[in-house]
Image: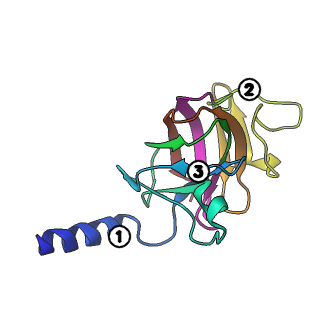
Amino acid sequence: MRWMLIFSLISFSHVFAGDNHARIDLVMLNYQPLEAEPKQGDSRVKHPGWVKDAEKKAANLYVIFKNECKDWETFSFSFTPKSDGKVRIILKSDNKSNFLYKEVSAKGATVKNEDFSKAGKNGLPLSWYSNNVKGFTKDGKNSTISVNHDTPFMQTIVVKKDQPVTLTVVVKSAE
């Protein structure tokens, strides 16, 4: 049993070794708790250790996807809000590496313009905001956003108390 645990930890840490990861941060805007299972397939979900205030820490989650998304990959993860409110979805990377997202969808909540196909007058996809106008590419039916740690794309969704939300993203490394 002990060896199985050690092997599991080594295998899990190998998948997430290095720091070239696509990442999503979630923030419950009314600072009520968000709950999630820590291991979800090829995703790791945590409350951020760098947030020291316990109330704010419980209202934040970050999700890291496995390393080396060389091709388009689909990842899903779930969380449960402990109150009605709004959750900000922040698409980014874990460092300066660039990642491309081409879809963000939800079950249990509504993500607007989930495939980034509708562009706004400001040069960004409708319903998404960022300081990275150059990070949006619209090419016919295929639209993508490019993010890194410092140039995220964000959207706020409405959530209901104790109703699980499953977010699914399609992402790949732009490197």
Kind of residue at disc 3: Pro
Kind of residue at disc 2: Lys
The correct choice, above or below, for 56 with respect to 84 in the image is below
1 vs 3, front mark: 3
3 vs 2, front mark: 3
Q: Is residue 76 rendered magenta in the image?
A: no
Report whether residue 73 is seen. no
Q: CA distance from mark 3 to mark 2?
A: 32 Å
Read off the residue under disc 3.
33
Q: Toward the viewer: 65 or 20?
A: 65
Split into 4 quadrants, where in the image is the C terminus?
A: bottom right
The numbered mark, 1 or 3, whose residue comes first in the sequence reads 1
Kind of residue at disc 1: Ser
Q: For residue 118, which numbered disc appears in the image?
A: 2
Q: What secondary structure is found at the residue carrying circle 2?
A: loop
Q: Which residues are magenta?
A: 90-110
The numbered mark, 3 or 2, whose residue comes first in the sequence reads 3
The numbered mark, 2 or 1, whose residue comes first in the sequence reads 1
Which residue is located at x 51 percent, y 70 percent?
19
The correct choice, above or below, for 13 with respect to 168 in the image is below
Q: Residue furthest right?
A: 121
Q: Is residue 101 rendered magenta in the image?
A: yes
Which residue is located at x 72 percent, y 47 percent?
30
